Amino acid sequence: MLYAGIRQTTTRNATAVADLARYGTDHQVDVHAVELDVTCQDSADTAVDRILTERGRLDMVVHNAGHMVLGAAQAFTDEQFADLHDVNVPGTQRVNRAALPKSREQGSGLLVWIGSSSTRGGCPRSWPCTSPPRPRWRMALGRCAPT
């Protein structure tokens, strides 16, 4: 059985949850969405507790949540960079705090990290330039663009 942590499962990402369920049915994969917002410790704790309640154990955690921004550094606010950091760095540690004690109690478990260059060290990728952005960057300017 596989659980996919997704935030806002009943609102903004309800379509993604439905797509996940359809994928599971179409490919005979026992997969379920679990509400998980990595920016909230209570959410991480609740997600792990739900999995343990339903399955009795937690075999693997795959870290795949992350955001990246593209564009001129001056185009982003301090708050946007702080939000980006909160997902990419403390977010993974919140999930670790929820999951790793349970894995230790079980005596087994695997932690897998999937990331991009933007998650190494928690530093966002941005270019300090004053010229207009290249066309492929335009949509990301002024907001954090999830990857």
Image (cartoon, grey):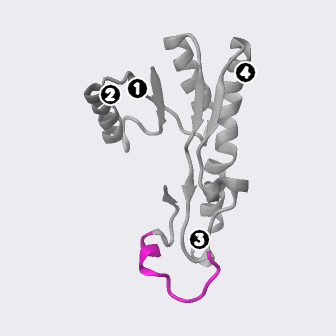
Of helix, strand and loop, which one carries label 3? Answer: loop
Q: Residue at x 70, y 38 (%)?
A: 93
- In this view, the residue in front, 71 or 114, is 114
Residue topped by disc 3: 76
The amino acid marked with disc number 2 is Gly
Q: Find residue 53 and report its horizontal and vertical position in percent.
A: 53, 12
Mark 3 neighbour density, 10 Å: few (under 14) some (14–19) many (20 or more): some
Residues marked 3 and 4 touching at CB (< 8 Å): no
Residue contact between numbered discs 2 and 1, judged by CB atoms under 8 Å: yes
Magenta stretch: give its range. Answer: 127-139
Marks 2 and 3 in Cβ contact (< 8 Å): no
In front: mark 4 or mark 2?
Answer: 2
Residue at left offset 71%, top offset 30%: 97
The nearer-to-camera label among 2 and 3 is 2
Say the numbered circle drawn on residue 24: 2
- Closer to the N terminus: mark 4 or mark 2? 2
Label annotation for residue 101: 4
Q: CA distance from mark 2 to mark 1?
A: 8 Å
- Amino acid tagged 4: Pro
Please identify, in this view, whether the residue under mark 2 or under mark 1 is nearer the observer: 2
Q: Residue at x 59, y 55 (%)?
A: 116
Query: Residue drawn 43% across and 39% down?
Result: 8
Label 2 or label 1, whichever comes before in sequence order: 2
Is the residue under label 1 in contact with that under label 3 (CB below 8 Å)? Answer: no
